[in-house]
Amino acid sequence: MNEKIKDILKDIYKIDPSLRSDEVEIIKVLEELLEIEPDLEPDEEFVLSLKKQLVESVGPMKVVGKKEFSFLEMYKGLSFAIGGLVVVVVILISVSGISNRSGVDMENGRNLFFSSEPTVAQLKDNAFGVLSDLNVEKSSSDEVNMESVPAGAGGGRYSTPPGNAESKIDYPFGPMYYSYVYAGEEIVIEQEKMDVFRKVPTSGSVKGGSVTGRINFNLFDLGKVGDANVGNISFVDNSDFGYRTEIDFTNGSAYIYKNWEKWPNYYSTTCTSEGCYETDRPSLSDIPDDEVIVAVANDFLSGYGIDTSIYGEPEVNRDFLMYYKNIEDAYIPDEVTVIYPFLINDIKVYEGYGNISGLNVNYDVRSGRVSAVNNLTVQNYESSLYDTERDFDKIINSVNSPDRSKPVLYDERTESVKVTIELDTPFVGLEHFWRYDKTENKSYEYLVPALIFPVKSISEDNYYWKKRVIVPIIKDFINQSDGDPIRIMEKTAVDTDVDAAVSEAVE
Amino acid sequence: MGFDEKKIIRKCQKGDWSEFGVLYDFYVEKIYRFVFFKTMHKETAEDLTSRTFLKVVEKIGSFDADTSFSSWLYAIARNGVIDHYRKKKEEVDIDDFWDICLNEDIDKKIDDRNRLQKVGQYLNRLKPEQREIILMRVWGGMSFREIAEATGRSEGGLKMFFSRFVRGAKREDILNIVILGILIR
């Protein structure tokens, strides 16, 4: 009898000697189990190879604690995106900004892993200079005056503001002047100084020579790019429902979005008339429950090896419903966004216009699939203590500053409206700013401690497009401008002439 | 264990990885087997074992060295398995790996499917977690303590569970009882 079986039988009889009467049957079961025993020993080659990989990855690295540094394979999921390419590009990179702080030596032949977990390096007080003197601009993409920032200098991406001209809110509406009333509890701010965070740029992290030497590109000599910095790399998956993946090495970000050519285009195939465009639009009932949408998003991110544990609890953005008195009138979008909030030391980050800032995952209502991932970004910060505004009255007064009270978007041909907004007791968050430094010709991202005032109520028959009002409490930032209001343009004589010419040509 | 595990972990946390290989050598086969029992697929087991150790390297800075390293390690491996099945979008219970492996993932070295299914009939009478424990003991030769650590259950709890099961079991479940009896040491 097999020694292993004897050993097991011994165990069994210790518990219940009477089971000896079933010994034949027991042995039969055990023999069958052992007979089909698979090879449980891992290949020696695998064991050695993994060991080598681990030793190489930890060799020169100094692990200095969770909040300061952590390795993560940010682009783990990229492996199968790369798999679809004819030319496989192996990125051999040296990272100056990251490696210097983390102690990671990026030698040739080693893969670079950006850290996706927030890392913060503490600097001396006021290390970023006098911030009130800088050309600081709100990160809110609908408010940034992009004209002042040269192309390629970084900065937020424009997006259509809520309540844009495509929505069904009755336009035109008059200029809305906002008056804020505080209706919360009294607040005491104890900290004299608080940390301002500045993102460590990743620009220059990848050199051209590390990439071009591996590509046979016969149209011109790729070697001419020399050691110029790599700005972007993109990958295209041409299978059905495939994705395009872009890595922006300048800003340390990645974007994944649907490859339009390989996704069904409902509006060019099924719906080709104005009528069906209106009638076949998704309805509210087409949008699944939040749990379902979040599960799809989680699954997608997991498939790409994107660690969601570094973000706050995901939230489905249903703001498209908040601009309408009657939900039935709401314009239901084709895509719904799940936001995974950024957390720095467990504090949430907000955009200047009041929304939560985070990793965005778009859910396509028609296909039930993820259609895009935005804001997947390296979060390496430096922090420095700055003076806090502790006078709560001053903070409240700043809410009613002309900058915040003026209209955001208006048609000057109609009468103005005064909207009163009640604000509830605030909580602490971080506000996201961009700052363009003219001397360096470079934009920086800042996270600034702020009070987040939830909107408690809006005066009757009016609407307000923010759910929260954000006020930075660092003195250097407290009165930063929101930018000029956007006036809806009246048609000029030239426009009218163009319209007429177009009509004539069509006829 | 002929080495000071906590000391090695603390050194790793301070950036000195010189003895990490000792930890690796001690655990790599255990983790591989543990993952194999849940996937029944060699390449998948290798992939998940790799991911487990890469995660250890990545996260060791946040590990509390005063707690059980092996429990933490098995928890990482277990989460890796769960993620694996989520990605595969299996419609069956992720713990019901026996059904999964019979469907598609069975290792090619196990070619006698009929025999496997026959044994599977016995094992299918058990709950997934009980079945997993049996395979760890019979195939893996793991001690009761090791199984307790791997499954995140206490030794005492498992013994109590077993004794209740034995007392309440019917005659036709004798084989199950017998097999579970293997676990008591």
Image (tube, coloured by chain):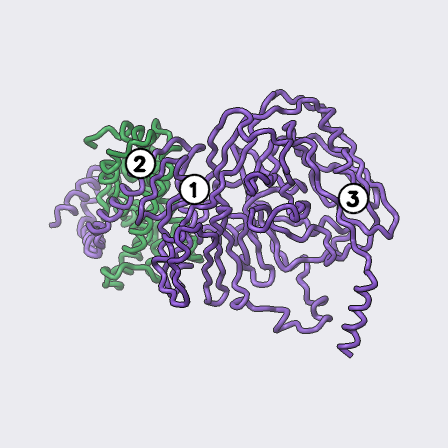
Chain colours: A purple, B green
Secondary element under disc 2, as helix, strand or loop, is: helix
Residue in the foreground of this view, choosing between A230 and A235:
A230
Q: Where in the figure is residue A23, as x and y percent of width and height? A: 18, 48
* Residue under the point 25% across and 39% down: B24
- Specify the subunit that label 2 lies on: B
Circle number at residue A407: 3
Asked if the residue under mark 1 is in contact with the one under mark 2, i.e. CB atoms within 8 Å, the reply is no
Vertical arrangement, residue A391 with respect to residue A467, above or below = above
Q: Are marks 3 and 2 on the same chain?
A: no
Which residue ends up furthest to the left in the rendered image? Answer: A1
Numbered badge on residue A440: none
Is A483 on the left-hand or right-hand side of A371?
A: right
Query: For mark 2, what is the residue?
Result: B70
In depth, the one of A220 and A231 nearer the eye is A220
Task: Say whether marks 3 and 2 touch (CB < 8 Å).
Answer: no
Q: Quadrant of the C terminus of chain A?
A: bottom right
Q: Is residue A242 above or below residue A47?
A: below
- Tell me where residue B19 appears, x and y as whole percent: 24, 33
- The residue lying furthest to the right in this view is A415
Host chain of mark 1: A
- Whether marks 2 and 1 lie on the same chain: no
Q: Secondary structure at mark 3?
A: loop
Name the side, left or right, on which A195 lies relative to B180: right
Badge number at residue A115: 1
Task: Please tell me how crowded label 3 is: few (under 14), some (14-19), or many (20+) other residues with Cα within 10 Å.
Answer: many
Write down the chain letter for disc 3: A
What's the residue type where badge 2 is placed? Answer: Ser
Q: CA distance from mark 2 to mark 1?
A: 26 Å
- Could you tell me the amino acid type at mark 3? Pro
**Which is nearer the N-term, disc 1 or disc 3?**
1
Residue A117 shows up from this direction = yes
Q: Is residue A441 left or right of residue A82?
A: right
